Image (cartoon, grey):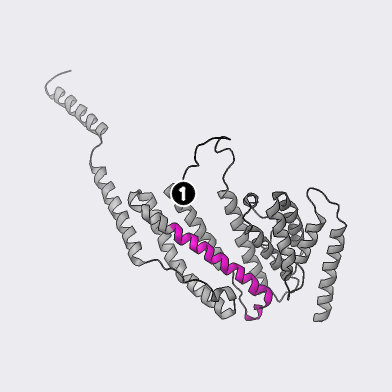
Amino acid sequence: MRMLKRASDALKDASSLFIANWTPRSAYRNPDIEACVIKATSHNGSRIDYNSAQRIFAWIRVSSHYIHPVLSALSTRMERTHNWTVALKGLMLLHGIFSCKVPAIQRIGQLPFDLSNFKDRNPNLCHHEAFIRAYYTYLNKKSSLMFQQEPKTGSLRKGSKEKPRQPSTMQDLVMLENLQGLLDTLLDIKPLKEKMANVLVLEAMDCIVIEIFDIYSRICNGIAAVLVRLYAVGKDEAVKAFSILQKAAAQAEVLSRYIEFCRDFGVTKASESPKIVHIRKEDIQALKNIIDKVSNQQKIEELIPREEDKAMILQEDIKETDLMNGVT
Protein backbone atom coordinates (compact mmCIF):
# COMPACT_ATOMS: atom_id res chain seq x y z
CA MET A 1 0.00 0.00 0.00
CA ARG A 2 2.84 2.37 0.91
CA MET A 3 4.68 1.58 -2.34
CA LEU A 4 1.51 2.31 -4.29
CA LYS A 5 1.14 5.70 -2.58
CA ARG A 6 4.77 6.61 -3.32
CA ALA A 7 4.29 5.72 -6.98
CA SER A 8 1.08 7.76 -7.11
CA ASP A 9 2.79 10.79 -5.50
CA ALA A 10 5.76 10.53 -7.87
CA LEU A 11 3.36 10.41 -10.82
CA LYS A 12 1.62 13.58 -9.57
CA ASP A 13 4.94 15.44 -9.41
CA ALA A 14 5.98 14.18 -12.85
CA SER A 15 2.66 15.28 -14.30
CA SER A 16 3.00 18.75 -12.72
CA LEU A 17 6.53 19.08 -14.11
CA PHE A 18 5.36 18.09 -17.59
CA ILE A 19 2.65 20.76 -17.54
CA ALA A 20 5.09 23.38 -16.18
CA ASN A 21 7.58 22.71 -18.96
CA TRP A 22 4.91 23.52 -21.53
CA THR A 23 3.85 26.74 -19.78
CA PRO A 24 4.16 29.82 -22.05
CA ARG A 25 6.75 32.24 -20.64
CA SER A 26 5.40 35.65 -19.60
CA ALA A 27 5.96 38.38 -17.03
CA TYR A 28 3.82 36.41 -14.59
CA ARG A 29 4.83 32.84 -15.42
CA ASN A 30 8.23 31.26 -15.79
CA PRO A 31 8.50 27.51 -16.63
CA ASP A 32 11.93 27.22 -14.98
CA ILE A 33 10.68 28.77 -11.76
CA GLU A 34 7.52 26.65 -11.73
CA ALA A 35 9.61 23.50 -12.22
CA CYS A 36 11.88 24.47 -9.31
CA VAL A 37 8.89 25.17 -7.05
CA ILE A 38 7.41 21.74 -7.89
CA LYS A 39 10.72 20.01 -7.16
CA ALA A 40 11.21 21.95 -3.92
CA THR A 41 7.69 20.99 -2.78
CA SER A 42 7.62 17.39 -3.97
CA HIS A 43 5.53 14.65 -2.33
CA ASN A 44 8.69 12.85 -1.20
CA GLY A 45 8.56 12.97 2.60
CA SER A 46 12.03 11.52 3.12
CA ARG A 47 13.98 14.03 1.04
CA ILE A 48 14.24 17.79 0.60
CA ASP A 49 15.48 19.24 -2.70
CA TYR A 50 17.78 21.96 -1.37
CA ASN A 51 19.24 22.71 -4.80
CA SER A 52 15.88 23.75 -6.25
CA ALA A 53 15.16 25.92 -3.22
CA GLN A 54 18.57 27.61 -3.50
CA ARG A 55 17.95 28.35 -7.18
CA ILE A 56 14.70 30.10 -6.25
CA PHE A 57 16.46 32.17 -3.57
CA ALA A 58 19.19 33.10 -6.04
CA TRP A 59 16.63 34.33 -8.60
CA ILE A 60 14.95 36.53 -5.99
CA ARG A 61 18.26 38.03 -4.86
CA VAL A 62 19.17 38.84 -8.47
CA SER A 63 15.95 40.75 -9.21
CA SER A 64 12.69 41.58 -7.44
CA HIS A 65 10.92 40.86 -10.76
CA TYR A 66 11.21 37.15 -9.96
CA ILE A 67 9.17 37.44 -6.76
CA HIS A 68 5.79 37.53 -8.50
CA PRO A 69 6.26 34.38 -10.64
CA VAL A 70 7.73 32.55 -7.62
CA LEU A 71 4.77 33.47 -5.40
CA SER A 72 2.34 32.68 -8.22
CA ALA A 73 3.80 29.21 -8.74
CA LEU A 74 3.95 28.55 -5.00
CA SER A 75 0.36 29.75 -4.44
CA THR A 76 -0.94 27.49 -7.21
CA ARG A 77 0.90 24.56 -5.66
CA MET A 78 -0.40 25.30 -2.14
CA GLU A 79 -4.01 25.91 -3.14
CA ARG A 80 -4.27 22.60 -4.97
CA THR A 81 -2.60 20.31 -2.44
CA HIS A 82 -4.17 18.21 0.28
CA ASN A 83 -0.88 16.58 1.18
CA TRP A 84 0.84 17.72 4.38
CA THR A 85 4.31 16.99 2.94
CA VAL A 86 3.79 19.33 -0.01
CA ALA A 87 2.23 21.98 2.24
CA LEU A 88 5.06 21.88 4.78
CA LYS A 89 7.74 22.05 2.09
CA GLY A 90 5.91 25.04 0.60
CA LEU A 91 5.87 26.85 3.95
CA MET A 92 9.56 26.13 4.49
CA LEU A 93 10.29 27.48 1.01
CA LEU A 94 8.34 30.65 1.78
CA HIS A 95 10.18 30.97 5.10
CA GLY A 96 13.44 30.84 3.16
CA ILE A 97 12.18 33.50 0.74
CA PHE A 98 11.51 35.84 3.69
CA SER A 99 15.11 35.30 4.78
CA CYS A 100 16.47 36.59 1.46
CA LYS A 101 16.36 40.13 2.89
CA VAL A 102 15.13 41.66 -0.36
CA PRO A 103 13.19 44.95 0.18
CA ALA A 104 10.42 43.91 -2.26
CA ILE A 105 9.51 40.98 0.05
CA GLN A 106 8.25 43.53 2.57
CA ARG A 107 5.54 44.51 0.09
CA ILE A 108 3.94 41.03 -0.03
CA GLY A 109 1.59 41.69 2.88
CA GLN A 110 -1.08 39.05 3.42
CA LEU A 111 -0.03 35.76 1.84
CA PRO A 112 -1.57 34.98 -1.58
CA PHE A 113 -2.75 31.54 -0.42
CA ASP A 114 -4.61 30.28 2.64
CA LEU A 115 -3.73 27.18 4.68
CA SER A 116 -5.53 28.26 7.85
CA ASN A 117 -8.05 25.42 7.36
CA PHE A 118 -5.64 22.91 5.81
CA LYS A 119 -6.87 19.31 5.64
CA ASP A 120 -4.88 16.29 4.49
CA ARG A 121 -6.55 13.58 2.42
CA ASN A 122 -5.58 11.13 5.14
CA PRO A 123 -8.06 11.60 8.02
CA ASN A 124 -5.56 10.20 10.55
CA LEU A 125 -3.10 13.08 10.28
CA CYS A 126 -4.79 15.68 12.48
CA HIS A 127 -1.52 16.47 14.30
CA HIS A 128 0.24 17.16 11.01
CA GLU A 129 -2.66 19.36 9.92
CA ALA A 130 -2.41 21.38 13.15
CA PHE A 131 1.32 21.81 12.59
CA ILE A 132 0.74 23.12 9.05
CA ARG A 133 -1.97 25.53 10.18
CA ALA A 134 0.18 26.93 13.02
CA TYR A 135 3.19 27.40 10.72
CA TYR A 136 1.03 29.15 8.11
CA THR A 137 -0.48 31.44 10.76
CA TYR A 138 2.99 32.57 11.81
CA LEU A 139 4.26 33.23 8.28
CA ASN A 140 1.10 35.14 7.36
CA LYS A 141 1.39 37.25 10.52
CA LYS A 142 5.08 37.90 9.86
CA SER A 143 4.41 38.91 6.25
CA SER A 144 1.67 41.33 7.32
CA LEU A 145 3.92 42.88 9.97
CA MET A 146 6.77 43.32 7.48
CA PHE A 147 4.34 45.12 5.17
CA GLN A 148 3.29 47.48 7.98
CA GLN A 149 6.93 48.26 8.79
CA GLU A 150 7.98 48.95 5.21
CA PRO A 151 9.26 52.52 4.76
CA LYS A 152 6.63 54.38 2.76
CA THR A 153 7.82 55.95 -0.47
CA GLY A 154 7.28 59.67 -0.69
CA SER A 155 7.86 60.26 3.02
CA LEU A 156 10.93 62.28 1.96
CA ARG A 157 11.27 64.28 -1.22
CA LYS A 158 13.60 62.81 -3.82
CA GLY A 159 17.07 64.25 -3.42
CA SER A 160 16.28 65.59 0.04
CA LYS A 161 19.23 65.60 2.45
CA GLU A 162 16.89 65.42 5.41
CA LYS A 163 17.58 62.36 7.53
CA PRO A 164 14.71 59.92 8.23
CA ARG A 165 13.13 60.58 11.59
CA GLN A 166 14.20 58.30 14.38
CA PRO A 167 11.30 56.30 15.87
CA SER A 168 9.94 57.64 19.14
CA THR A 169 10.07 55.63 22.35
CA MET A 170 6.38 54.80 21.96
CA GLN A 171 6.96 53.53 18.40
CA ASP A 172 9.80 51.34 19.65
CA LEU A 173 7.53 49.96 22.38
CA VAL A 174 4.78 49.17 19.87
CA MET A 175 7.35 47.34 17.75
CA LEU A 176 8.39 45.30 20.79
CA GLU A 177 4.75 44.40 21.40
CA ASN A 178 4.46 43.21 17.80
CA LEU A 179 7.60 41.09 18.14
CA GLN A 180 6.26 39.54 21.33
CA GLY A 181 3.06 38.69 19.47
CA LEU A 182 5.13 37.05 16.73
CA LEU A 183 7.03 35.04 19.33
CA ASP A 184 3.76 33.81 20.86
CA THR A 185 2.64 32.63 17.42
CA LEU A 186 5.98 30.89 16.83
CA LEU A 187 5.75 29.03 20.13
CA ASP A 188 2.39 27.62 18.99
CA ILE A 189 4.19 25.67 16.24
CA LYS A 190 4.82 22.37 17.96
CA PRO A 191 4.73 18.73 16.82
CA LEU A 192 2.20 17.01 19.05
CA LYS A 193 3.13 13.42 18.45
CA GLU A 194 6.42 11.49 18.66
CA LYS A 195 5.70 9.78 15.32
CA MET A 196 6.01 13.21 13.67
CA ALA A 197 9.78 13.17 14.25
CA ASN A 198 10.71 12.56 10.62
CA VAL A 199 13.27 14.30 8.40
CA LEU A 200 10.84 16.92 7.12
CA VAL A 201 9.33 17.97 10.45
CA LEU A 202 12.75 18.10 12.13
CA GLU A 203 14.05 20.33 9.33
CA ALA A 204 11.05 22.63 9.74
CA MET A 205 11.62 22.75 13.50
CA ASP A 206 15.26 23.74 12.92
CA CYS A 207 14.01 26.71 10.88
CA ILE A 208 11.51 27.61 13.60
CA VAL A 209 14.05 27.42 16.44
CA ILE A 210 16.44 29.69 14.50
CA GLU A 211 13.58 32.14 13.95
CA ILE A 212 12.61 32.02 17.62
CA PHE A 213 16.06 33.03 18.81
CA ASP A 214 16.34 35.73 16.16
CA ILE A 215 13.09 37.34 17.34
CA TYR A 216 13.84 36.81 21.04
CA SER A 217 17.25 38.45 20.55
CA ARG A 218 15.59 41.45 18.89
CA ILE A 219 13.15 41.69 21.81
CA CYS A 220 15.97 41.59 24.40
CA ASN A 221 18.04 44.19 22.52
CA GLY A 222 14.97 46.40 22.10
CA ILE A 223 14.14 46.21 25.80
CA ALA A 224 17.71 47.07 26.74
CA ALA A 225 17.64 50.12 24.44
CA VAL A 226 14.32 51.31 25.85
CA LEU A 227 15.34 50.84 29.48
CA VAL A 228 18.21 53.29 28.97
CA ARG A 229 15.70 56.00 28.02
CA LEU A 230 13.02 55.27 30.60
CA TYR A 231 13.96 58.01 33.06
CA ALA A 232 13.22 60.60 30.37
CA VAL A 233 9.82 59.26 29.25
CA GLY A 234 6.28 59.98 30.31
CA LYS A 235 3.78 57.83 32.15
CA ASP A 236 2.19 56.30 29.01
CA GLU A 237 5.54 55.03 27.76
CA ALA A 238 6.52 53.77 31.22
CA VAL A 239 3.24 51.86 31.64
CA LYS A 240 3.58 50.22 28.22
CA ALA A 241 7.23 49.36 28.92
CA PHE A 242 6.21 47.79 32.22
CA SER A 243 3.66 45.60 30.42
CA ILE A 244 6.28 44.56 27.85
CA LEU A 245 8.79 43.75 30.59
CA GLN A 246 6.28 41.55 32.41
CA LYS A 247 5.41 39.81 29.14
CA ALA A 248 9.10 39.24 28.38
CA ALA A 249 9.63 37.63 31.78
CA ALA A 250 6.71 35.25 31.18
CA GLN A 251 7.84 34.47 27.63
CA ALA A 252 11.32 33.55 28.83
CA GLU A 253 9.81 30.82 31.01
CA VAL A 254 7.64 29.51 28.16
CA LEU A 255 10.60 29.63 25.78
CA SER A 256 12.77 27.62 28.18
CA ARG A 257 10.18 24.85 28.32
CA TYR A 258 9.72 24.94 24.52
CA ILE A 259 13.45 24.57 23.85
CA GLU A 260 13.67 21.73 26.35
CA PHE A 261 10.83 19.98 24.51
CA CYS A 262 12.63 20.51 21.17
CA ARG A 263 15.83 18.97 22.55
CA ASP A 264 13.93 15.90 23.70
CA PHE A 265 12.16 15.72 20.32
CA GLY A 266 15.49 15.65 18.50
CA VAL A 267 15.67 19.15 16.99
CA THR A 268 19.34 19.79 16.23
CA LYS A 269 19.26 23.59 16.50
CA ALA A 270 17.65 23.39 19.96
CA SER A 271 20.80 21.69 21.27
CA GLU A 272 22.91 24.47 19.76
CA SER A 273 20.71 27.29 21.06
CA PRO A 274 22.21 30.11 23.15
CA LYS A 275 21.38 30.68 26.78
CA ILE A 276 17.96 32.23 27.33
CA VAL A 277 18.13 35.66 28.98
CA HIS A 278 15.62 36.11 31.78
CA ILE A 279 14.28 39.49 32.85
CA ARG A 280 15.47 40.43 36.34
CA LYS A 281 12.89 41.19 39.00
CA GLU A 282 14.95 44.25 39.92
CA ASP A 283 14.37 45.75 36.45
CA ILE A 284 10.63 45.21 36.69
CA GLN A 285 10.53 46.75 40.19
CA ALA A 286 12.65 49.73 39.08
CA LEU A 287 10.24 50.39 36.23
CA LYS A 288 7.28 50.17 38.61
CA ASN A 289 8.96 52.74 40.85
CA ILE A 290 9.30 55.10 37.88
CA ILE A 291 5.60 54.73 37.06
CA ASP A 292 4.65 55.40 40.70
CA LYS A 293 6.92 58.44 40.81
CA VAL A 294 5.46 59.88 37.59
CA SER A 295 1.91 59.22 38.84
CA ASN A 296 2.57 60.99 42.17
CA GLN A 297 4.15 63.93 40.35
CA GLN A 298 1.10 64.26 38.11
CA LYS A 299 -1.21 64.19 41.17
CA ILE A 300 0.81 67.02 42.76
CA GLU A 301 0.68 69.03 39.55
CA GLU A 302 -3.09 68.57 39.40
CA LEU A 303 -3.40 70.26 42.80
CA ILE A 304 -1.41 73.28 41.69
CA PRO A 305 -3.62 75.81 39.83
CA ARG A 306 -2.53 76.71 36.31
CA GLU A 307 -1.77 80.36 35.44
CA GLU A 308 -5.04 80.78 33.54
CA ASP A 309 -6.93 79.27 36.48
CA LYS A 310 -5.21 81.72 38.84
CA ALA A 311 -6.33 84.62 36.64
CA MET A 312 -9.94 83.42 36.64
CA ILE A 313 -9.92 83.03 40.44
CA LEU A 314 -8.50 86.56 40.84
CA GLN A 315 -11.20 88.03 38.57
CA GLU A 316 -13.92 86.25 40.55
CA ASP A 317 -12.45 87.62 43.82
CA ILE A 318 -12.43 91.18 42.39
CA LYS A 319 -16.06 90.89 41.26
CA GLU A 320 -17.11 89.55 44.64
CA THR A 321 -15.27 92.40 46.44
CA ASP A 322 -16.89 95.02 44.16
CA LEU A 323 -20.34 93.63 44.87
CA MET A 324 -19.71 93.71 48.60
CA ASN A 325 -18.66 97.38 48.29
CA GLY A 326 -21.74 98.26 46.27
CA VAL A 327 -19.88 98.79 42.97
CA THR A 328 -21.97 98.09 39.86
Q: Quadrant of the N terminus?
A: bottom right
Left or right: residue 47 compared with residue 162: right
Residue 16's x, y, as percent?
Answer: 83, 63
Is 187 rendered above or below residue 177?
below
Q: Amino acid at mark 1?
A: Gln
Q: Within the magenta stretch, is there residue 182?
A: no
Q: Within the magenta stretch, is there residue 204?
A: yes
At x 84%, y 51%, the residue is: 25
Left or right: residue 228 compared with residue 1: left
Displayed quadrant of residue 82: bottom right
Quick one: 12 or 100, which is closer to the camera? 100
Q: Which residues are magenta?
A: 194-222
Left or right: residue 209 compared with residue 221: right
Residue 148's x, y, as percent?
Answer: 57, 49
Q: Residues within 10 Å of mark 1 (few under 14, many from 20)?
A: few
Q: Magenta residues: mostly which secondary structure?
A: helix
At x 74%, y 59%, the residue is: 74
Furthest residue to the left? Answer: 325
The answer to whether residue 173 of the structure is visible from this angle is yes
The answer to whether residue 188 of the structure is visible from this angle is no
Quick one: 27 or 16, which is closer to the camera? 27
Q: Quadrant of the C terminus?
A: top left
Q: Residue under label 1, please give it.
A: 171
